[in-house]
Amino acid sequence: MRFSFVLFFAGPLFAQPGEQLEIFEKKVRPILANNCYACHGQKVQMAGLDFSSTEGLAKVVSPGDPGESKLYKAVVYADKIKMPPAGRLPDRDIADLKAWIESGAASPKNTTAVVVSANPMTARLAEGKKYWAFQPVQSYAPPKVKNEHWVTSPIDRFILAKLEEKAIRPPAAAAKLTLLRRATFDLTGLPPGLKEIEEFLADGSKDAFAKVVDRLLASPQYGERWGRHWLDVARFADSTGMDEDHVFPNAWRYRDYVVKAFNEDLPFDRFLTEQIAGDLLPPDSPGGINQRGVVATGFLALGPRPLAQQDRVQAIYDVVDEEIDTTTKTFMGLTVACARCHDHKFDPILTKDYYSLAGIFASTVIYRNLGKPGAVSFLYDAPLDTAAFARYQASRWRMYGKQLEMEEALGEDWVREYALLRPKMAKILVEAWKAEHTHVEAQDAQVAKWVKWLRAADDKARQGYLEQWFGATEATIEEVAREYQARYIKAAVQFDQSLESWRRRYASDVLQERDLSPRPTASDPFFAAATFKGGPMELADSPRVALARQEWEAMKESLPPEPPMASGVLDGVSIDQRVFLRGNHFNLGEPAPKQFPTVLAGESQHPVSRGSGRLELAKWLVSSNHPLTARVFVNRMWQWHFGEGLVRTPNNWGKMGEKPTNPELLDFLAKTFVDSGWSIKAMHRTIMLSSVYQMSSHASPEARDADPPNFLWSRFNRMRMSVEQIRDGILALSGNLDLTVGGSLLPTDPQVKGRRQQLDLDDLKRRTMYIPVRRGNIPVLLTTFDYGDATTASEGRSRTNVAPQALFMINSRFVVERSKEFAKRLLDDAALSDTQRIERAYLLALTRRPEPDEVDSALTYIGNLEKQLGKSDAHRTAWQSLCQVLIATNEFLYLN
Amino acid sequence: MPVNNTTLHRPRLLPRRTLLRQSAAGVGILGLRALMAAESAPANLLAPKAPHFAPKAKRIIFLLMGGGPSSIDTFDPKPRLERDNGKPVPFRRGLTFGETSVGGLMKPLWPYKRYGRSGLPVSDLFPSVGSCADDLCVIRSMVGDGVDHGAAMLQLHTGVFQFKRPSMGSWTLYGLGSENQDLPGFITIKPSGHGGQNKWSSSFLPGDYQGTPIGNGNMKVEEIEKEPMPYLISKGLVSEPQRYELDMLQKMNRRNAELNNHDPELEARINAFELAFRMQIKAPAAFEVEKESNETKKLYGLDNEVTRDFGWQCLLARRLSERGVRFVQCSHSYWDQHSQIAKIHPELALQVDKPIAGLLKDLKARGLFEDTLVIWTGEFGRTPWAQNSDGRDHNPYGYTMWMAGAGVKPGFVYGATDEFGYHAVENRMHIHDMHATVLHLMGLDHEKLTYRYAGRDFRLTDVAGTVATGIIA
């Protein structure tokens, strides 16, 4: 309906069919929007011109006659008026404008009206409502199958039914130790130890594997491994990336929150709500905050953030866009951010839907303050102990206040004292010169001070700023002294002024909580040397200054440390958002009330009337009839267990995404998940205790033939491990893995500018997930093994195979050192024979015993290498080499 | 769905689904099988690929002057500024980085000389580059959208200033592959500063197209020479014993592959180890700048402390280029003189002037100039007005970049800024247009070089970009 008025409008100049209007929409409006509206639009009408209306355009366009059109004459730079002033438009644009005027200059009544679309969105909305992913989750009964023996869980029926349709036999179950290795790396990211191997081998009971799963789910390392999956989706990193790449000093709290949420099996609906609106949940105690909730909103806060973007509105809406993109991909598998500039090209998502969500995020605080021109902006940090934070702020302000009081007093003293002292300098210098050259000690105290200082001057000063003084003769000294005085006064006045403006800036920096500007230093070396650090012009503190200084120092000493802070968000001013036509914030369209995408939430919604609307957004996402939230998350779980999702485009469930390979199973899992109270651990058990999870990675010949991409789950996917599994696994073999859970590895001294130092990753023994990741400088090891860029919600890691990965395995200090430690572990156990050592190495690294020929081969290798090396430590080196070989094998790198 | 040549050069693992979607649309089931079979022998993503049309340039050397050198003071003389020096700014200033301490107009601080037969004017900051003026194609009408370093750097390298996107080096590698399988195809020497890794990131393109950094801006040349690429130098066994170690590893890997039906992925990794071993033997030679003749070293200024660092970068760039590395970037900084431009610009110019001229001359002498494109630019230029009395602010609205070598008109000036050197007014070349033009010179159609990601086709030039045919020889 909203589109029709455009087509019905008819005026004397612009009676045009829709097709011509489309030329305006496609070619002309973008030119006007990008180049003209900022000065000749709804907001500003320079020269009284408003190109956003027909009337306005009529003033500068003669339909059919470019030569008579002021607009055209201005853009070709033919006359005095040259537009746009920023430079001539590209020829292509000028040609488009010309063609449009020649064809009659058709434009809709209001040129900022809604885009006329060849494929009206209303029709697509209606069609979209029938789209499979937007249907409620169905309740499917697990299908009947022929091979009942294979079934251990309802999941198996959904899978087996499809395999039987294609006459594909499922593969045999994986060998016991293969399964143990698979499950242990899967749930904890680490290899099973000797004890776990023995226990599982010895346990012949039916529920032996169920016990393993329970044990793994209960280990603290489970939350690290599965939290890491989530951090990929949440595009987690420790810095802002983009322009300035400043460190987020508190990002780790969100990481710890995620690890804990998985370990405690926080229900997913709660997990989601906390991450979008945790700050709005009931406080832990009256008048306080919901501490966990505030930390959880790091999900929104920790994205890539522009800090130096000088168009501040652009900066804010780029952040809003990033939040919309991450939130909608993560929880709904929809690419809503595609609708920023135009209605979504493929999915029934309106630009208005986008700006309805934009209103929610634009009403949420991200920047603590936007920097002044030429400076960077600051992001909001949420205090976790509000009372302590208030006290801390109060003591800081008192301290800065005292500092300013001291500075002010100092400034007054300067004015008073130097008013007398500075004009006398030339005279004193002449006296000093005379005293020096007549060897008569100066009587005047001031002169004596100068003489003493000048005598003590070092060579650098003598050849530098004191050269004229030392080179002066009786004939020239008066002139030289005058010059020194003039120079001194000029520098002093400049310095006084810069101090004065610094004091003002400092006060406003303090008030606005910006980084404090450093106190200016004097640039003239003569002035600086004469005035400070024992120079003859140095002023002693007056009693007033001395007292203020003493109090300030004491306050500095007793300033409490910064109380705990988190990267989080809070509700700001509730904004009445309007559509930005073509994504351009100079170009306002219709109002977009805070509500949810029309195709899912319907045409008649009650827009959010108070606050940002984040809590309402979260509630809507976890409502029991939301068709996407549960499906999207169980699909991720399936993907993380099996390497691919049931929907293989986990962040895009729209038209350009993949359809589910087993839609009934998807819905069964989604329903089971919600029915279990959104329990992630229950879902792990459901999945892992199935035959599907426990089958071998060896495809049957007919499966390889009929199902090469494994859409039917005809075998377990063989997967190269992630960089975390590889590095942590190697550390585990070395026996030196530090299993401390949580905390930050960033340097803690807040004074370290930018906090950008790198850790020595070769020596670090903590798990890989704790390595600080700066978006602008991701450690080479991580990027080598497809860590991703922590910039957008991850679809899952790539598993590339490039030569630098092989170089890491054969050459890196990390692998060499860890394999040395691995070898030492084997050699230090004096009770073992060499054969037993090799068996143990295989068990630890590959979770299996070696075949006899493998033992022989390894022993031969060690013997030969030892001979070849022939050095005193050849024996150890040979064992180290064998250990390194085991670590570098495909068998270690892949999970079967 | 349109299947174009480029998207068929697909990565092994990720776009299997893309492939299938394409297949389902047009190839049919037989074709599907064939494609699957092709996939079972994993393609080398870096194998050389045919361009869209005959290229003018085979490789690029990109000289980045970080911080933004002043065009007005180097390659774009402005008599009007000479005349009106010190007068108030007579036009409306656009969005700038620092609104503070804005002064009057400031004339070019160095005199210009006309060089060569072309008579191309170059300021006294660049006398050696001036001596190569007849080889330069000076583009005086560059335009970008970022007024701060981060945004401008991102756009210069990726086309986009808000988001992370593949770098132009990655796109060329994706389009053309690499001519040397023992070296990375995209190398960035001593990268530093704003934009960080985003300047050489392959983003959503496969990791094979990622740029390889050689050291970083803070490292000394000696330090870099010890291990120019990550993990290139073994910290364990070396030479014969390491080969023996690798043989043991490969024996175990082959046994494992046999037990797993010769899974192509496992086979590919066996090959990757052989490639890595070859690389560590062959790649170091490319970095042995020391082995160049004294004459050559002198040409690049390696004999002088001031010019040594950038000279080494330029000479290494030539060595890598002649070995077939597709895209080499050298980085110099930091030209961001908001104040003290008169003091610092000459110091910086001195560090690069001779090395750049040396590079151009050396490329010519070795016959590499005909198919190598050299690009010199900052992320933006600087304002015609003074800031902080003796500096200039950022200016992305009209600045100078020059190219030289393959495919561009020599001794040629393209485009112009207004009489103050503030806005580009003639033949404006937006960064998108520059990218389109550079890809064109490499034989790639910027509208066809697409990659499907997150449900749509992406380009280096986004939805813009026009090839500047006016600069093409």
Image (cartoon, helix red, strand yellow):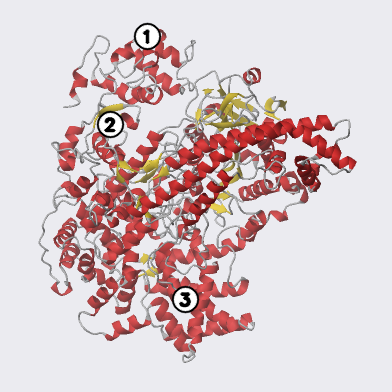
Let me know if marks 3 and 2 both belong to one chain: yes
- In what element is the residue under mark 2? strand
Relative to B462, is A284 above or below? Answer: below
Mark nearer the N terminus (3 vs 2): 2
- In what element is the residue under mark 1? loop
Residue in the foreground of this view, choosing between B244 and A678: A678
Mark nearer the N terminus (1 vs 2): 1
Which quarter of the image is occupied by the C terminus of chain A? bottom left
Give how far apart the Cα atoms at labels 1 and 2 are.
34 Å
Q: Chain of mark 1?
A: A
Q: Quadrant of residue A717?
A: bottom left
Which quarter of the image is occupied by the N terminus of chain A? top left
Give how far apart the Cα atoms at labels 1 and 3 are.
81 Å
Residue in the foreground of this view, choosing between A843 and A526: A526
Q: Residues within 10 Å of mark 3 (few under 14, many from 20)?
A: many
Residue drawn where x is 53% and y is 24% of the image: B424
Mark 3 lies on residue: A734
Residue A784 in percent (x, y) is at 47, 59
Residue type (three-letter) at the residue carrying disc 3: Ser
Please tell me the numbered disc located at residue A579. 2
Residue type (three-letter) at the residue carrying disc 2: Val
Residue B255 in percent (x, y) is at 43, 75
Mark nearer the N terminus (1 vs 3): 1
Q: Quadrant of residue A496?
A: top right
Q: Chain of mark 3?
A: A
Question: Viewer-nearest of labels 1 and 2?
Answer: 2
Mark 1 lies on residue: A65
Let me know if marks 1 and 2 both belong to one chain: yes
Q: Residues within 10 Å of mark 2 (few under 14, many from 20)?
A: many
